Structures are given as structure tokens and as C-alpha cells.
Amino acid sequence: MEAREALARARSWSSPGVRPQPETAKEVASTLADRVEALERAAAAVLRNALDAVEVHPCDVHDDAVRAKGLRGPMADLYAAVKNTQ
């Protein structure tokens, strides 16, 4: 799934009236799990694009940790947050 599609899906769930309000704890948990999953997919897609844009030595082309050193600002923060949850 493309980053834009995943992010649009996650955003659509926060819009009023898009999904019915859950009535049970099980439905709440399921809704939250769906939202977290959509956000994780969006974050992974955005990070993949950012990591692929970082130029590295050819021997490091498959090493995301090396590529991550080229990330700056919020993208570096997002990378760190995602890596801390895995």
C-alpha cells in the first residue's frame, strides 16, 4: 500500500460520522487495532520512501541502519520511534 493511501485511510477514521461508534469493549479494541495497523503501515511506507532517498555507499545499500543516519528532523524521530516499537 502506498504511503498516501495508508495515511488517507488512517485519517478517514478520525473524521466524524465515517465509522459508527463502537458499543462494546471488544469493538473498541478492534477499532483501535485497525487504526494502529493503518498508522503503522503509513509510517512504514513513509520511512521506506525516506530511507530509499538517502544516498549511501553501494555496500550499505541494504542496511537501513546506515541509511537512517542520513535522516534529519522529524523523519529521524519517526525512524527512532518505529524502531523502538519493534
Image (cartoon, helix red, strand yellow):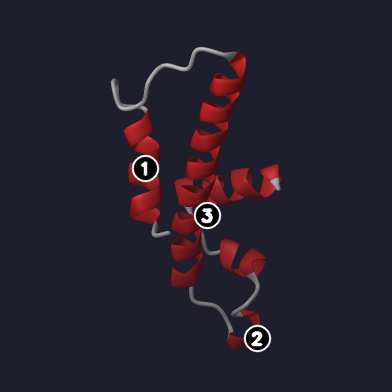
Q: Nearer the viewer, residue 63 or 14?
A: 14
Would residue 77 appear left or right of 1 to someone viewing this image? right
Q: Earlier in the sequence, mark 2 or mark 3?
A: 3
Q: Amino acid at mark 1?
A: Arg
Q: Which mark is residue 9?
A: 1
Residue at the spot of label 2: 59
User: Residue 17, image x and y in percent?
Assistant: 28, 21
Q: Relative to residue 70, is residue 32 depicted above or below? A: above
User: Residue 28, image x and y in percent?
Assistant: 55, 20
Q: Nearer the viewer, residue 34 or 26?
A: 26
Disc nearest the viewer among 1 and 3: 1
Q: Relative to residue 44, is residue 64 depicted above or below? A: below
- The quarter of the picture where residue 18 lies is top left
* Residue lying at 57% horizontally and 51% vertically, measured from the top left: 79
Residue at the spot of label 3: 44
Q: Relative to residue 52, is residue 36 depicted above or below? A: above
What element does badge 3 sit on? helix
